[in-house]
Image (cartoon, grey):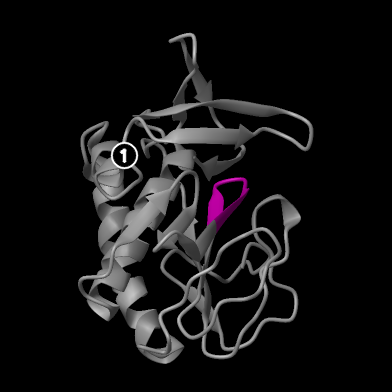
Amino acid sequence: MLADSSAVEGDWLVALEQTAGKGRQGREWRTEPGNFFGSTLIELSAGDPPAQSLSLAAGLALVEALDRAAPGRPFLLKWPNDLLLDGGKLAGILLERQADRVVIGFGVNLAAAPDVHGRKAAHLGSRISPESFAPLLAAAMTRLVMLWRTAEPGEFARAWLARAHPVGTELSVHADEKTVIRGTFDGIEPDGTLRLRLWDGTVELIRAGDISLG
């Protein structure tokens, strides 16, 4: 969508099959029949909140759509862009920016969970089809992006925290292949930056990296 000059904010691209899906740090996001793969475009304007905080709006929109698709399930947001169900990864979000255009991509295991070595995955067991889930997510994104632009600073951080792993959860942050920082979750900044409380009591701000719980 970034390469499509005719695409405008609010447009969606939804695929029933992917042959080259990717996640964070270039990882493969494997395609399984019946799962959801969709992307939408946001055009940044002067006065918008920090672009990285769009990940908070996207996570909340995804939870809102899934709450409607499968009421009562214990969906849990995991920093920076994952959504868990019963400890397994149910969905991932990927943001890519070019100038003032941001594409937000969603991958959701609606029907099946891929077998990924060393990572637990979850799925909804075909409770809803991709075709039915798409309008739920599109409506939620429209509402949450509007709120993202008008809400007071910190409101999205508080809303995101209400659906995330609790403060005090032990975390391991993999900054790169060789660097692992361990501590406990101390919340997030208004722009979505992770607050990691180290064992000596100091707080380190983490703007990028993968985390594991516990």
Count of numbered tags: 1
Between 206 and 213, which is closer to the camera in this rendering? 213
Identify which residue is drawn at 43% across, 10% down: 201
Between 94 and 144, which is closer to the camera in this rendering? 94
- The verdict on residue 97 being magenta is yes
Residue 100 image position (x, y, % from top left): 55, 47
Q: Quadrant of the N terminus?
A: bottom right
* Kind of residue sitting beneath label 1: Pro
- The verdict on residue 41 being magenta is no
Extreme residue toward the right, this view: 178
State left or right for residue 13 relative to residue 131: right
Identify which residue is drawn at 31% across, 39% down: 166
Between 212 and 94, which is closer to the camera in this rendering? 212
Q: Is residue 161 above or below residue 135?
A: above
The segment highlighted magenta reads 94-102
Q: Is residue 142 above or below residue 166?
A: below
Identify which residue is drawn at 71% across, 50% down: 25
Between 91 and 41, which is closer to the camera in this rendering? 91
Local SS, label 1:
loop
State left or right for residue 213 relative to residue 127: right
Tell me the quarter of the picture where residue 3 sits. Answer: bottom right
Residue at which label 1 appears = 166
State left or right for residue 9 relative to residue 2: left
Residue 4 image position (x, y, % from top left): 64, 69
